[in-house]
Image: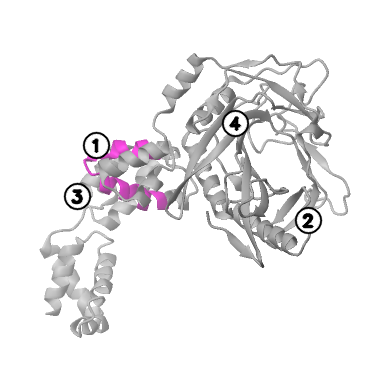
Amino acid sequence: MEQKETGAMNFETVIGLETHAQLQTESKMFCACSTKFGNDPNSNICPVCTGQPGSLPVINEKAIRLAVKTALALNCKINNESVFARKNYFYPDLPKDYQISQFEMPLAEHGYLEIEVGGQIRKIGITRVHLEEDAGKLVHKGSIGIKGADYSLVDLNRTGTPLMEIVSEPDLRTPEEARVYMEELAHILRYLEVCDAKLEEGSMRCDANISIRQAGVKELGVKTELKNMNSFKAVQKALEKEEARQKEVVSEGGKIYQQTLLFDEATSSVHPMRSKEGSHDYRYFPDPDLLPLYVDEKMIEEVKAGTGELPIEKFKRFSGQYGISGQDINVLIESRYTADFFEETAKISGEPKLSANWLIGDVSAYLNANNTALKETKLTPTLLSGLIELVKNGTVSGNSAKKIAAEMMKTGKSAKDLVESMGATQISDESALVEIAKKVVAANPQSVEAFKSGKEAAIKHLIGQAMRETKGRANPQIIEDLLKKEMA
């Protein structure tokens, strides 16, 4: 493992991550309230999630199944029996004055996640995966739009939202490894459709524990905890800042104190928030309103059977089966829906490489431009395969195909129908293109002269002009041949 020197001291960095993922359920962890984002403040609440006397929690089965699915993907041992505990602390957005979580007996333990950094595979241990509920949200003065206000408002809509906490072993040795770990974990969560893993929106949050020690020393140093990191790059940047600070302090004879730090992305700096709590500060004890949770082997097998191939398994199979690049495969397996869409299109069209090119190129460009997802469009593998066939047999040009693809995604109409309604049939008849070639050559003497002087790139400009004249319908190869013949 690479170790960096600061002054005369040789340090090793030790990092562990605690990741909170919001589970994609329609109701909360212990009640039937909606988890829908963006509703009016304090509209998604009930006596259970606001901790009213006499109310009793009921466990959300879907949340259990999603957590089991994740734990299996992370190679964890599922505990048949786990216990919900009360984590006691006071804060205005926590109406019960405790959070229901898991402590001594979590849902799953002892797993690992493999990451690749610098061409090397690293196995990062997973200490535990457990379930808990989220707290509410405070809206402080200055962010509520009331000039001169000096108070805070509380929105309890988020209170009770199902969270899954994934705790890594302190196996990460560089801030870069921490970023890659987070990216890979987010990929798995999205692929499993467990969590949308958007750090910038708070559906996935990360607390990073970091310490340093002299090389060769086994004992861990005093750790600090970093919060408020809203992107994968911010995770790496924050850890780099704190790593440098700790090394400087120790090198100058100072001490590191256990505390929680906030990362300010605007200034790329870390600031103390409070002294770091220990687990004893929360006075955990089993929740008396909830019986121990039993996950039997039947449920585990049901979840396992419904999980299917994981991204790493699909990557290996795609590499051998379809002969497409690793970079392209990573895009295709970003979500299970896209991966399945690609395979079905490749099967129908018989063209895996063209199928991949369309999904990675023009389809992705349309999705990004319209801020939408593939599953939210009307495109199907059958429709895309039909378009690929029309391009292959020369019925439509590449330029026209881009426009047809966009219409297919909006309307769900077939490529054949759109070619007719849009008048997008490719012009491949030389007699119909000769006059266009003559017109373009006559109108662009500078490009013609440049081409005749040996500048091959000039032909691209002329082809572009011909495409403009035919609204993208000219057969590119035929029009190029006619242009060259006209300039001979």
Label 1 sits on what residue type?
Ile
Quarter where residue 91 is shown: top right
Q: Which mark is residue 129?
A: 4
Label 4 crowd bin: few (<14), some (14–19), many (20+), radius 10 Å: many
Whichever of callouts 1 and 4 sits on the residue coming sooner in the sequence is: 4
Decide whether residue 359 is among the magenta residues.
yes
Q: Which mark is residue 348?
A: 1
Q: Residue at x 65, y 50 (%)?
A: 229
Whichever of callouts 2 and 1 sits on the residue coming sooner in the sequence is: 2
Q: Is residue 46 above or below residue 23?
A: above
Whichever of callouts 2 and 4 sits on the residue coming sooner in the sequence is: 4
CA distance for labels 2 and 1: 65 Å
CA distance for labels 2 and 3: 68 Å
Label 3 crowd bin: few (<14), some (14–19), many (20+), radius 10 Å: few
Q: Position of 68 compared to 357: left or right?
A: right
Which residue is denoted by mark 3 in the rendering?
392
Nearest to viewer (mark 2 / mark 1): 2
Label 2 sits on what residue type?
Lys
Colour theme? one colour
Which residue is denoted by mark 2 in the rendering?
255
> Does the CB distance between marks 2 and 3 fall below 8 Å?
no
Q: Quick one: 450 or 281, which is closer to the camera?
A: 281
Q: Quick one: 178 or 8, which is closer to the camera?
A: 8
Span shown in magenta: 338-365
Q: Residue at x 73, y 27 (%)?
A: 45
Residue 412 seen anywhere in this rendered image of the structure: no
Label 4 sits on what residue type?
Val
Q: Position of residue 125 (x, y in %)?
A: 55, 38
Element on which disc 3 rests: helix
Label 3 sits on what residue type?
Lys
Q: Position of residue 355 (x, y in %)?
A: 29, 45
Q: Main secondary structure of the magenta part?
A: helix
